Amino acid sequence: MESATQARPKTPNIVLAKRQTRAKRPLGLYDLTLPELEARLGKKRLPTYRARQIWGWLYRQFAPDYAAMTTLPVELRADLSAELPISTMETVQIRSADDGETLKTLYRTGDGELVETVLMLYPDRATVCVSCQVGCAVGCAFCATGLGGLTRNLSAGEMVAQVVGAARQARERGRSLTNLVMMGMGEPLHNYAETMKMVAILHDPAGMNLGARRITISTSGVVPRIDALAGEPWPVNLAVSLHAPTDALRDQLVPINRRYPVTELMAACSRYIERTGRRVSFEYALMRGINDADATARELAVLLRGELCHVNIIPLNPVDVLPYERPDAVGIERFAGILREAGIPTTVRYSRGLEIDAACGQLRAKAERLASQPSAGPIG
Ligand code: SAH
Ligand code: SF4
């Protein structure tokens, strides 16, 4: 999987520099924080309250276009829409599963990339699962997203657009969006600045006001960025995709382990817990015959003993081109039981939307496969 990343042609510095300059320009209104929007309107000699009005339309009303912002002067609406679109993300497809409790949306970015977002409605909460990159450079052995390497980072606005889209879908069903998990495509700590900017935009009390405790950032273990996250002003939740308690096994499953091995990762988690006082979740994708042995469960329990943490077992969501399998229900419960007996708080989380390929990167992978086969019809 790593070779997919290594095989990518080297980008000449000049192209990279141009790309970075371009990335700094906002793609859409969703890329701006409230202070940035105020500054932008200030340059047009418009009062600050106009920015707050727009902000309310964006993040309280979920206005789909400038025309809907009826409290703004018509000229200002025309002016803004000529300058900057609200979003550059176009909805390609929406699929539902679990009796309509899971909605998966496939978006096309302004430059034609496909990204996916999942909204999961539970009795007590509505959670959106957001993508932060097109593809991923980490290349975990069992993950559909990592198969083709990394194409590019998403901008903060491209992530915000996914969240607003989900909030709108929840509202249409009489619900409010309550939680956000960065568990879609990509490694959020490889797109740190834009992910943090997204948090700032959604956290803003004048808009969506999504509390940091309702936001979870999931990482494969980018150690220096775990330390950076511990120093951020927003107390977001941290989930670490551990999947194996030893380097021998984790090197195979999560290749970034070769750079940041288990001991370093656990030390970073301990620092994070100490500095923030917050519990860390460890994700464990359970694979038959790979990381589900009783002895492996016991090693995991020893590794995590005494930490303020809990384990989320995710029974593997099989990817058709990969050889990994999900253990049966007895095997899953047995593994969870060993952890619980050792005093490690453990939950088993079955993926939502299995029948619509709602796991990490799978819908996009299928859409791209179908697109490359001229005879294939639409998905589903
Ligand atoms: N890149 C981040 C976040 C996105 S993936 C990370 O790896 O943490 C969200 C979770 O889904 C991670 O724990 C990831 O390892 C897991 N995952 C990926 N593919 C999976 C699959 N096929 N079955 C079960 N879990 C999977
Ligand atoms: Fe990337 Fe996460 Fe998939 Fe690993 S599991 S390849 S880090 S998206």
Image (cartoon, rainbow, N blue to C red):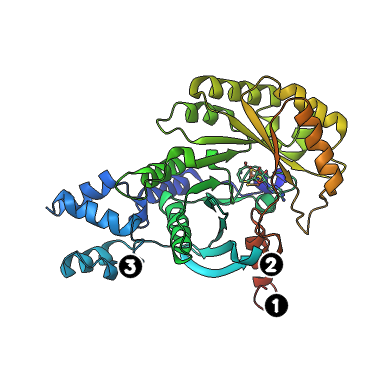
Q: State the residue at coordinates (77%, 30%).
A: 339
Q: Residues within 10 Å of mark 1 (few under 14, many from 20)?
A: few
Work out how far the residue at label 1 is from the one at label 3, CA to CA, in angstroms: 34 Å
| Residue assigned mark 2 | 369
Which is more N-terminal, label 3 or label 2?
3
Q: Is residue 44 left or right of residue 354?
A: left
Q: Mark 2 touching mark 1, by CB under 8 A?
A: yes
Work out how far the residue at label 2 is from the one at label 1, CA to CA, in angstroms: 9 Å
Where residue 342 sits: x, y (%)? 77, 25
- Asked whether residue 246 is in view, the answer is no
Q: Which mark is residue 376?
A: 1
Amino acid beneath label 1:
Ala
| Residue assigned mark 3 | 65
Which is more N-terminal, label 3 or label 1?
3
Amino acid beneath label 3:
Asp
Q: Is residue 70 left or right of residue 325?
A: left
Amino acid beneath label 2:
Arg
Question: Marks 1 and 3: which is nearer the front?
Answer: 3
Q: Is residue 35 left or right of residue 6?
A: left
